[in-house]
Amino acid sequence: LMGVATSGAREKKRLLKALAKAGCEARPLWVPLPTLLPYRSSAASAIPNARRAYAEIINIPSSTGLREEQVERVAAVLASADLKRLLA
C-alpha cells in the first residue's frame, strides 16, 4: 500500500482528478470508522490523527502486477503535482 500526503482536501481532490484523467486508479484513504453513522455514538476519542490522514492522504496504485508504463504514468502525475512528501 502506497500513500501520498497532500496539503489538504483541495489538493487531494485535484490530485485524484489528475490521476483519473491519466487513467490511474487512485482512491482516498479509508474513512475512519468512528465517523461512520453506526459507530458515531461509541467513539472513544476525537481521533485527530485519523481525521487528518483521511483529509490529506490518497492511495496510489502499488500492485506488484503494475506494468512499467503504468508506474511511469503515476510517477509523471505525482511529479507534476509538486507534493510535499510520499508515505510508504
Image (cartoon, rainbow, N blue to C red):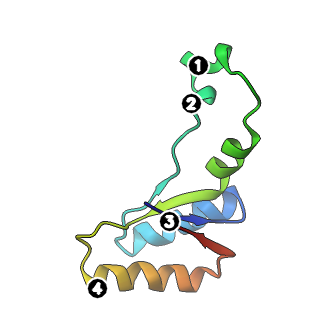
Marks 3 and 1, how far apart at CA? 30 Å
Q: With respect to residue 13, does 31 lie above or below?
A: above
Of residues 23 and 79, the one drawn nearer to the viewer in this rendering: 79
Q: Nearer the viewer, mark 4 or mark 3?
A: 4
Which of the two discs, 3 and 1, labels the residue nearer the N terminus? 3
Marks 2 and 1, how far apart at CA? 7 Å
The amino acid beneath tag 4 is Glu
The amino acid beneath tag 3 is Lys
The amino acid beneath tag 1 is Tyr
Could you tell me which residue is drawn at 65 percent across and 82 percent down? 82
Answer with left or right where residue 79 lies relative to residue 45. left
Could you tell me which residue is drawn at 41 percent across and 71 percent down? 21
- According to the picture, the residue beneath numbered tag 1 turns out to be 39
Residue 11 rendering spot, x and y as whole percentages: 66, 65
Residue 84 rendering spot, x and y as whole percentages: 69, 75
Whether the residues at callouts 2 and 1 have beta carbons within 8 Å, the answer is yes
Which of the two discs, 2 and 3, labels the residue nearer the N terminus? 3
Q: Nearer the viewer, mark 2 or mark 3?
A: 2
Marks 1 and 4, how far apart at CA? 42 Å
Marks 4 and 2, how far apart at CA? 35 Å
